[in-house]
Structure formats: structure tokens, C-alpha cells
Amino acid sequence: MKPSPPREYPLATARLTPLEPTALSSAERFRSVTLAADSADTARVARRTAGEVVRDWALSVSAGDVELCVSELVGNAVHHATPDGHQTPFGSERLIAVVFRAWSHWLFVEVTDEDSTPPMLPVGELLNPDLSQLEADDILPDHGRGLLLVQSLASAAWWAPRDEGGKSVFCRFDLDDHDRGH
């Protein structure tokens, strides 16, 4: 007996965000990088930047957790984001911005892309009491796991449409008390 396909629901939504990530650069610490979505090293550069932010700013959060969340969010943008449902014109690049903002209590990570489609989380089905009839792939959906991972590692995760189209997906890491002196 094979269960029905997983249902999905959107990640929590916030109000519109400004088009330019730098417009929100009032944080105590700020770093932003814009990447070509189709470049072979996009995910690697995003992960490396995340690790550098945690180390350079001496934040009391796991660099590995931040790197993994950034990697998942950038991976989603690379694999799923099409500029508002259209193919990019010949010769143009799909761009992704990764923005880090830190205040005394929090590190915010924002990943922007040009597709306004909401990110979706899988909604699990009720488990069949006779699991011996099911394969592992029947229980776990083949997509949406990355956002579940982000939600489990970060203190919060949400998304917002952007003023000029596209979207931003955010995650927040709560920092320990000893970061507040930086």
C-alpha cells in the first residue's frame, strides 16, 4: 500500500522586503554577496562566506549549522528559482544574494532570488500502522527536506516577497549572552 503524495504548505510569510538587501544594512555587522545561480561554485562560496561571518564576527553559534542552512537555502534558489516563472533571457544570469546581518542578540541570514513562488514545506501523512509494507522513500518525501533542516537548526525561518518581484528566505540564529559585548 503506497501512501498518497505528500501535501505541502508554505513557509511562514512576512510582509514585503525592500529590493536591495543593503537597504536593511542598519545592523551592527553586515556582509552581503551576490552570486550567479548557474555558477559551479555558488554553493561553495555561500558556505565559505557563512563560515567566515561566524568566525570573523566571533559569534556563539555553530559555524556548521549556519553553513548548512545557507547551503540549503542557496541550493533551493539554484534548483527551483526561475525569475517569476519565466526562463531567463539568453545571455543573462540568474542572481542570488546572500546577506548576513548581526545585532547583539541575533544573526539573520537572507537568501534572495528572482522567483516569487513561496518556498514549500512537506506535510507528512499519518503513518500506516503496518510500516513493514512501506519503503523508506514512501515515508520521507523526496523534496522539502532542506527547509525542514533549516527550521530545525535555526531559531526561526520565514520568507517574504520582494518589492520588485522575487522573494527572500530568512533564518535567524539566536546568539548567546557573551556575543552582546561585540
Image (cartoon, rainbow, N blue to C red):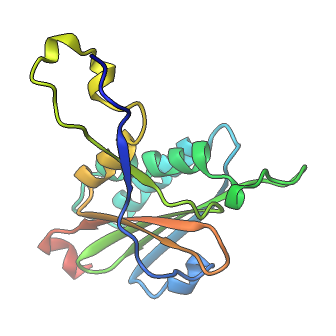
Q: Residue furthest right?
A: 90
**Residue in the image at 40% along x and 42% along y:** 144
Q: Quadrant of residue 158?
A: bottom left
In what quadrant of the picture does the C terminus appear?
Answer: bottom left
**Residue in the image at 40% along x and 71% along y:** 13
Tell me: 96 left or right of 74: right
In what quadrant of the picture does the N terminus appear?
Answer: top left
Q: Quadrant of residue 170?
A: bottom left
Q: Position of residue 138 (x, y in %)?
A: 31, 23
Camera-side residue of 151 and 36: 151
Camera-side residue of 18 and 52: 18
Camera-side residue of 97 and 51: 97
**Residue in the image at 31% along x and 20% along y:** 2
**Residue in the image at 20% along x and 11% along y:** 133
Q: Residue furthest top?
A: 132
Q: Position of residue 24 (x, y in %)?
A: 50, 84
Q: Residue furthest left?
A: 129
Q: Position of residue 15 (x, y in %)?
A: 45, 82
